[in-house]
Image: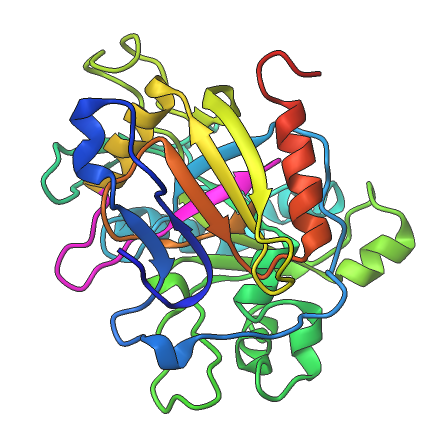
Amino acid sequence: MNLTGRPSIIRSVGRFSLPLLLAGALGCWSRMGPHEGPRDRVHFNPGTPDFNFPLEGSGMEFRMLANEVDDKAAMDEARLLLNQPDGIKAELDELQRNGLPPPAPRSAGPNKTPRQFRIFLPAAKPSQVSYSWVELGPSERAVLGLDNTAKNDPQRNATWNEAAGVRGKATHLTEGLADRLVRDKLLLGALFFSRECKNQELPEDERKKKAVDYFVLARNPEIDNEGLILPHGKAKAITGEYLLDVRSGGLERPAQPKIFFTLNDLGGKLLHELTEKNCPSNWIRRHLAILVNGLVIAAPTVNSPIASNGMITGNFSRQEVESLVNFLRGKLPGHG
């Protein structure tokens, strides 16, 4: 399967080593909404990234973004918590100064543990999940029209302006396509939160350059309550610990640099299970966030289940791809 859509696409490549995963060998992800097609392909030069990607931290992770159908209860609670913040203003100010995400839905009381919600996904048993806010990286900000270059570009600034009008609020945003009379919700109904960058951990010039912090609500890894893949009670986090290989490609064509990755068998099983239960149903297309060091580098839609092998493209520069690949390779077993 080969889909064309907005920048930022991840798709399976080759065959998987496990026979039970062969059905997913042609799986594909891309950013395409229900009304999108080849005419919507976007190519642009976002200019200088809003901030330098931090090349130290936890490595790669795969998480599902919350959407307004499956995760409505959590979104409603997240809005209630952040949009009427009188009781937590001091906490929000401190998190802003430290460059940390805002609080996600949590239990009442002093412990403030993440609140569990029961969600129902197609062709899957009900899931118990909690949530957290994850920050958009510089390339994904550019793809979504939230980079600072978009601010002064009349062809790209509609979403930037919309977000600027709701700083400090948890809200949906819409796609800023100049040729659209009806604008779809960004990432098909994801919940966003933005604020002025006041991160005291950054030098003043970098803080001013970044200008704004952008976050999106994501599901935390599910707990394995059946013990079918992992030991009972362990979180099904899909992280860099399962990476076998990561490499770059397409560097000879500046507009199409790519990141290829391979997961081991256990990582492939976890990713297959996650994408299988989040395949499209009716008009709903769910987004998978690919994070590096806690920052979203891409958020394509899940179109069919895949597993061990994938390719990520986006609005990356050659230098960004090389830096990310070199960092991730240093996190592989036997390195560093």
Residue at (48, 48) in percent of width and height: 312
Residue sticking out furthest to the left:
123
The image shows residue 166 at horizontal and vertical percentages of 55, 70
The reply to whether the magenta stretch includes residue 279 is: yes
Residue at (44, 48) in percent of width and height: 217
The image shows residue 279 at horizontal and vertical percentages of 21, 48
Depth check: give the residue in front, 321 or 150.
Answer: 321
Residue at (65, 62) in percent of width and height: 254
In the picture shown, does residue 141 fall above or below 277?
below
Residue sticking out furthest to the top:
231
Residue at (62, 11) in percent of width and height: 334
Q: Which stretch is magenta?
A: 278-294
Toward which corner of the image does residue 34 lie, by quadrant?
bottom left
The image shows residue 229 at horizontal and vertical percentages of 26, 15
The image shows residue 171 at horizontal and vertical percentages of 45, 63
Please give left or right for residue 143 compared with residue 24 in the image.
right
Depth check: give the residue in front, 322 or 151.
Answer: 322
In the picture shown, does residue 81 fall above or below 127?
below
User: Does the image show residue 220?
Assistant: yes
Toward which corner of the image does residue 90 lie, by quadrant?
top right
Toward which corner of the image does residue 164 lie, by quadrant?
bottom right
* Number of numbered callouts drawn: 0
In the picture shown, does residue 23 fall above or below 233?
below
